[in-house]
Image: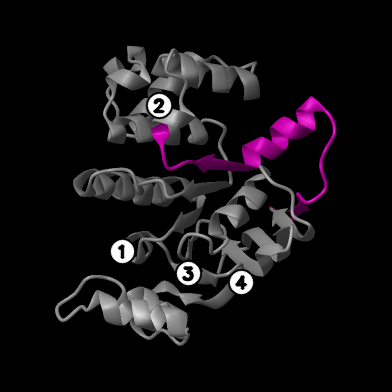
Amino acid sequence: MSEPVLQAVNLTRAYGTVRAVDGVSFTLPGGGSLGIVGESGSGKTTTARIVVGLEQADSGEVVVGGRNRSTPKRGRAHRLARAREVQMVFQDPYLSLDPRTSVESALRETLRLHFPDRDPARRVRELLGHVGLATRAADARPGQLSGGQRQRVAIARALAVEPAVLVLDEAVAALDVSVQAQILNLLADIREQSGIGYLFITHDLGVVRHVTDDVIVMRHGRVVEAGVTADVLTAPRHPYTRLLLDSLPHPGWVPERIAAARRAL
């Protein structure tokens, strides 16, 4: 087992009387892929935003590469170094890209910000090739690209800073099923080639089954089950995990029965 690249230790975050994240802990080994699953309101996205640094936990620690990220750092160099450690790919690639900026300009801007002494031209070509985009896409703006192409650009931009961890928040949820498969296969190839660690935030158990080694299941801000993905999805121990699996359409599926089970849980 690789050394942990990311550790979350007893994270908590409350909004008034609502505890969106309540004592969440997990470990992501180097080169590993961990899924966080749960329905809307389970706290999975808030957890991801804390890991990336977009929100501050009320208590607990986020440790990346042995360094505690829980205390805000002063100074531009420290903030950039911290940003390079963990990058995030969002659900809607169109909203995460500047519609006025070409693909090449977006990648160059990121590279200039983080690696000002490097020539970005060759790295831009490498990144486009890495995510399966032809070099002719470099001149395109987001509105001229398909949803799958835009998500490839978002992934390339995140990879440009050479992060140790890539957080993917419902990163394929807005894509057609066939395009989802292409992006998931791309991510699997990138992980195999680079050794980057993935944190997948999703409600889609099919995605979890396809791309993660381990999974944690969240409900009402708490982790209710955790383990090897194949084990959790094949023989779930917690009633909520079984409910999530039973909620997937299948022969003999009765939505009313699922709704009743949800109310009783």
Q: Which label was assigned to residue 215?
A: 3
Q: Which mark is residue 222?
A: 4
Query: Residue 161: image x %, image y %?
Result: 57, 32
Q: Earlier in the sequence, mark 1 or mark 2?
A: 2
* Badge 2: residue crowd in 10 Å (few <14, some 14–19, many ≥20): some
Quarter-wise, where is residue 109 in the image?
A: top right
Nearer to us of marks 3 and 4 is 4
Give whichever of discs 3 and 1 has the lower sequence position.
1
User: Could you give the CA–CA distance between mark 3 and mark 4, rounded to whole angstroms?
Assistant: 14 Å
Task: Identify the residue at image location x=47%, y=55%.
Answer: 200
Mark number displayed over residue 115: none
Is there a contact, CB below 8 Å, between mark 4 and mark 1? no
Give the distance between the C-alpha atoms of the residues marked 4 and 2, in whole angstroms. Answer: 40 Å
In the picture, the disc for residue 206 is: 1
Amino acid type at image mark 1: Gly
**Residue at x-position 45% and y-position 30%:** 95
Say whether disc 4 or disc 1 marks the residue closer to the N-terminus.
1
Q: Which residues are magenta?
A: 65-93
Q: Residues within 10 Å of mark 3 (few under 14, many from 20)?
A: many
Front residue of 108/250: it is 250
Residue that numbered label 2 is attached to:
126
Residue 244 x/y as whole percent: 38, 74
Q: Amino acid at mark 2?
A: Glu
Q: Is residue 13 left or right of residue 242?
A: right
**In the image, what residue type sits under mark 3?**
Val
